[in-house]
Amino acid sequence: MILNCRIMTADNRARVAEERGAVDRLSNLPINAIQNIIGRMPIRDAARTSILSSKWRYIWAEYPEVVLDEQFYAEIMRNNSPNFFLTEYVNKVNGILFQHLGPILKFVLDIPELYSTQYSSIDQWLLFVSRKDVTKLILHNRSPNPYKVPCYAFSCPKLAYISVTKYIFRAPNSEGFFGKLTHLFLETVTFQFSVLNLPQLVQLELKNCFGIQLLCVSAPSLRILNLQDNDDLDLSYYITCKDLVTVCIGLSVGVEHDKLDKNITLTKLLGCWPELECLYLNGSFLKHLAAGDIPQRLPIDQVNSLVYLAPFCITYHCAEIACILCLLQSAWNLSELEIWADEQIIYDEKTVSYLKDPDLMKQSFKGLQTVIMKMFKGLTSELLLVKLLLACSPSLERMCIEENQDLDPIERLNTSKELLRFSRASPKAEIIFQPGIET
């Protein structure tokens, strides 16, 4: 019996020694490898690595990325009753931030629904992070109540990337802010008067924002612009951005068209962006551009760089189709067209008559190789546009049509038969008619 105990003790010692060796091997990894491991963990698990060994004690505290996202607060919510959740959440964030050592290059904060009395804690967190050389700042407010971001949150001179959702935003007035900012994403943001001087900004996205008229932007290096569903549309700050290669403009249905700049036409707008390669325009904005006369084609060489065109939320209004065909006839290098139909397509006799006009097209779409049509219902105006594209695209290789999910089997069969009857200018053209994918 004594012998067995000794043997077991020896085995235990061997196992402990082996386990210690394993820990040592992990601890002896290069620091960048250890940080890579920590970066792939939820922050709660990453914090627990501090008990592995004395070497690991400060590695997590010095990790330059702090991600307090939805997963972080959801776990706290699961482990606490509703009465204690908010207090525990604030305490956890305080513990993580105020024990952190060294710079915080990336800071992500998803804010749950807090009481207004707890907003002072957020102010303290942002002040702390602003002094930590932050370069990437992501703030998402999950509460229905907007939180006013203090100006000092953006005071770090090294900030290069900002993403803010559901906040009240007022930019600091002092010079020197945003000098290195290259990417700015603002969604469901309410602006107070702000002047943004962004000399190095290359990508700007404003979605579902309010008070756009209070925002003044200077971004001479801008290359990607996305303006969607805002309460106003002012392009005067962007028409001077000659380096734009990708533009997306979605005019909100609720925006009063009589308040928009009547001088912005398709010709004037695209003449300002000679390097434009990808263009996304929604139906409401196309109709605004078509308020005046729509030329059959734009001036020579105006959109020579355009290779991808994506009209979206299209109702197949005659003005929308006229703008699309104008662009197709003007952009000689356009190779891909992607049309997203709106849910509210209705039969429009004017559109049908327009597309049936035998003298409508004066030239073919020589460069067009790919056409994608989504939310396709098989209405007469849609079928006539498909027929026109097939007949006028000698280089077409692939036309993919994704049907609307509400299309019944009989309509689907009749539509597919109709599509197969259309003549094609390109002998290589393949038509793919398939179910749409849920988004």
Image: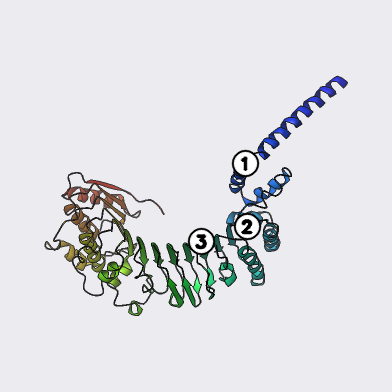
Name the amino acid, label 2.
Pro
Q: For the residue labelled by badge 3, is the local secondary structure a helix, a strand or a loop?
A: loop
Instruction: Looking at the picture, tell me which residue is in the foreground, 132 or 45.
Output: 132
Q: Is residue 248 left or right of residue 296?
A: right
Name the amino acid, label 1.
Pro
Nearest to N terminus: mark 2 or mark 3: 2
Name the amino acid, label 3.
Ala
Alpha-carbon distance for marks 2 and 1? 20 Å
Question: What residue is disc 3 on?
Answer: 160
Task: Work out which quarter of the rendered image holds the C terminus and state it.
Answer: bottom left
Alpha-carbon distance for marks 3 and 1? 28 Å
Q: Is residue 1 visible?
A: no
Image label count = 3
The answer to which quarter of the image holds residue 261 is: bottom left
Question: What residue is disc 2 on?
Answer: 103
On residue 169, the disc is none
Q: Is residue 133 above or below residue 427?
A: below
- Residue shown at 58%/59% (left/top)? 107
Q: Is residue 340 left or right of residue 37?
A: left
Instruction: Looking at the picture, tell me which residue is in the foreground, 434 or 161.
Output: 161
Q: Is residue 263 above or below residue 139?
A: below
